[in-house]
Amino acid sequence: MTVLRRSLPSPFGCRWCGIARRSHGRQWIASQGWHAWEQPTNAQILARMRARRAAPKES
């Protein structure tokens, strides 16, 4: 299975769901329930950046 960059969360997206701050609003996910945007941890940012670099580009 190939994971494209666009399907990965933004490095600075919400800590819980990965959605960008400007389009987040209130979101619901099973593990967190209803939540507002929350800053990701430094470890999450680094892991997301590495995953995006490793993913193949769209053609």
Image: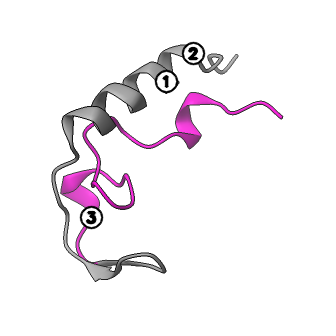
Question: CA separation, marks 1 and 2?
Answer: 5 Å
On-image quarter of the N terminus:
top right
Circle 2 Cα neighbour tier, 10 Å, few/some/many (<14 / 14–19 / ≥20):
few
Q: Amino acid at mark 1?
A: Arg
* Percent x, y of residue 15: 28, 54
Amino acid type shown at disc 3: His
Residue 24 x %, y %: 27, 64
Q: Does residue 27 appear left or right of residue 1 in this picture?
A: left
Residue 25 in the magenta stretch? The answer is: yes
The nearer-to-camera label among 3 and 2 is 2
Residue 5, image x and y in percent? 56, 29
Question: Measuring 32% from the left and 38% from the top, which residue is drawn there?
Answer: 44
Q: CA distance from mark 3 to mark 2?
A: 26 Å
User: Which residue was labeled with disc 2?
Assistant: 54
Mark 1: few, some, or many residues within 10 Å (few <14, many ≥20)? some
Q: Residue at x 38, y 24 (%)?
A: 49
Task: Specify start and end residues of the magenta stretch as a single range.
Answer: 1-26
Determine which residue is flagged by label 3: 24
**Which kind of residue does numbered mark 2 sit on?**
Ala
Q: Residue at x 69, y 33 (%)?
A: 3
Image height of 27 relative to 43, above or below: below
Horizontal side of residue 58 vs 13, given as left or right: right
The residue to which callout 1 is attached is 52
Please count the marks in the image.
3
Report helix, strand or loop for mark 3: loop
Are dots 1 and 2 in contact, CB under 8 Å? yes
Q: Main secondary structure of the magenta part?
A: loop
